[in-house]
Amino acid sequence: MQQVATVRLDHITKRFGEGADEVTAVDDVTLEIDDHEFMILLGPSGCGKSTLLRMVAGLEDPTAGDVYIGDRRVNDVEPKQRDVAMVFQSYALYPHKTVQRNIEFPLKVRGVNKADRAAEARQAAEVLGLVDYMRRKPGQLSGGQRQRVALARAIVRRPAVFLMDEPLSNLDAKLRGDTRAELVDLHRRLDSTFLYVTHDQVEAMTMGSRVAVINKGRLEQLGPPQEVYDRPASTFVAQFIGTPPMNLLPDGLMGGSGVRVGIRPEHMQLSVSGRLEATVRQVEHLGHEVLLLTESAAGIRLVARVAPHIDLPVVDQQVRFDVADIHVHRFDTASGVRLP
Amino acid sequence: MKRRLRDLPPALAMLVPSMALLGVWTVYPLVKAIRTGHLDCNLTATKCRDVGWDRYVDVFTSRQFQDALMVSVKLALMTVPAGLLLGLGLAMLADKHLRGIGFFRTAFASTVATSVAVASLVWFVLLQPEIGVLSDLFSGWIPALKNPGLLRDPDTALPAIAVSSVWAGLGFTFIVISAGLQSVPKELYESALVDGAGSWRRFTNVTLPMVSPSLMFITVVLTTRALQTYGEVALLTQGGPNPERPTTTIPYLIYGEESLIRNNLGLKSAAAVLLFLICLVFALLQFRMFDKRVQYSR
């Protein structure tokens, strides 16, 4: 029977440095991660998402606020007593130990006897397809295999919470895609709580049950990936999620004064009577779709995503776009916050 | 192939300076010493006769050389582990991110800028039984400090030299191990911490294996240095106190003013060649011993 592994961050603030050098890495973040949830912390580099994760692990102390794992406040609890396992971006494998010894290490530290250690390590290795590599050292493995060893070392302890700090960022694109699916599968099999840090919106969209978007140390939006995509809470989220990002019109255009309108590229419809006029600057054929990179007379760049089979405009051609009202996002110009 | 031939003249030209230095200062003296080791000369070296390779066996098995070898080995056994442990300890202390740590780093490394002669003089004054600070402060615990003085007591003279030698070498050891420590990825410690490893386990599972190449390098260098100890002996004890000669190391036997063989060029050369071979054997043994255990790759 597994313990309840909710993670609750209550008004967490973290500052580094002193005086003029003081930097606020995390600014009053409150966040609750449900038991068995796959929560993604998404944001650009330097936004404070890794610092948040490290505070859950116990590698950093919050300047203010409380961290709870289950019902227990863990601010003053040593990392090893928090029942968390962490997978590092660099994998942090012990280069002098074999794969087997790496995986066994957390158990050895906890005084598990040799036979049980070997059995548990083997089980973890089976889950991750590492059985044939147990006697090798990390230096003799590929990047993907090392990443699996790091995962195996995390799961062997059966922790309540898994903390992952950009675990896929050192893999090539193909491997990253495969491993994404495997991690989702692993989460389902382990039935544990995952807290996963990434700057990759594709990982955020495809893996998480919920996404917490973080910018400049603050929580910008929290919700299921599709909701975050469909109803971005701010201009930051609107532009951070989606490739290419949402078109943001200048203040007043299509909206009233003090309002900025945003339109996703896929909602830009070519139409002879459209409200937006622009000149095509570039046509990018991506196979399954085509991106039209255009610029209005006022110098506003607009990107449209259109189907490849339609009668495409050519470079320097004048085009008009229209957009259905339900696809118009409205933001407050001053604060960037979404308007109802 | 053609390209290689064309590159040959400039390559040779660039090698000439170092080859010349190596030849003049290392190869020629070594060959000359090996030759001189065969010779039995009169006092002014005006008349010599060749006594052959047996000379080396005679010197090696002589009581003086055996005694000096024992002294050198004892000195190595005293200085190498102590130097390693202290260097590692200081380097680990200085690796902490504390306020004002820069001062201590500089202080720990400062003996690098101190010559053996200066270091020996400092210790000579410190250990001086009549005016030395150490004798004044600690003679209550260690009476030998005052009477007769550590350097004048045959039982304590060598340990006293070892202390001076360790101190003089500490800066170098500290710098090399510090560099090794700084290259250890921080995540390894953090990962061990989250996995539940205490400070001792982090030391044995992360620190030690990760700095093992530095430790091996230091061990070889310190051993060679200990076997070649001359300056400390010449300045602190002149190989004495006599008649026991408990601090006559092999180099002191070779060069020392008070050496029993100071006037015999042939014997001295033979002893020098033997010392070279002994250092070589030690270094090779250490490389063999460590090579399997040292962690080089990431």
Image: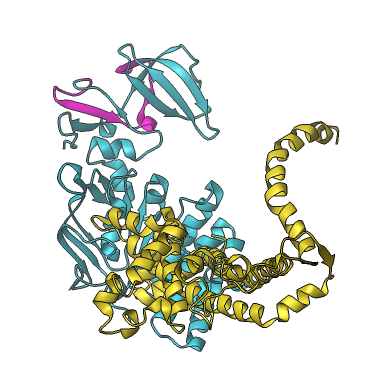
Chain colours: A cyan, B yellow
Left or right placement of residue A200 versus residue A132 in this view: left
In magenta segment, residue B18: no
| Quadrant of the drawing holding the C terminus of chain A | top left
Q: Does B42 sit above or below residue A120?
A: above
- Percent across and percent down for residue B25 are 68, 50
- Rendering coords of residue A110 (x, y %): 38, 82
Residue B126 relative to residue A112: left or right = left
Left or right side of A146 for A281: left
Residue B173 picture location, percent across and down: 46, 62
Look at the picture and state if A301 lies above or below A194.
above
Residue B247 showing in the rendered view:
yes
- Looking at the picture, does residue A15 appear above or below residue A111? above
The residue positioned 19% from the left and 24% from the top of the image is A255
Question: Which residue sits at x=78%, y=59%?
Answer: B46
Closer to us: A16 or B1: B1
Q: Nearer the viewer, residue B177 or A261?
A: B177
Residue range (magenta): A253-277
Which of the pair A253/B160 is nearer the observer?
B160
Q: Which residue is drawn at 31% across and 61% down?
A: B96
Total marks drawn? Answer: 0
In which quadrant of the rendered view does residue B109 lie? bottom left
| Near-viewer residue (A316 or B51) | B51
Using the rendered image of the protein, determine whether residue A89 is visible from the camera's viewpoint: no
Q: Quadrant of residue B276?
A: bottom right
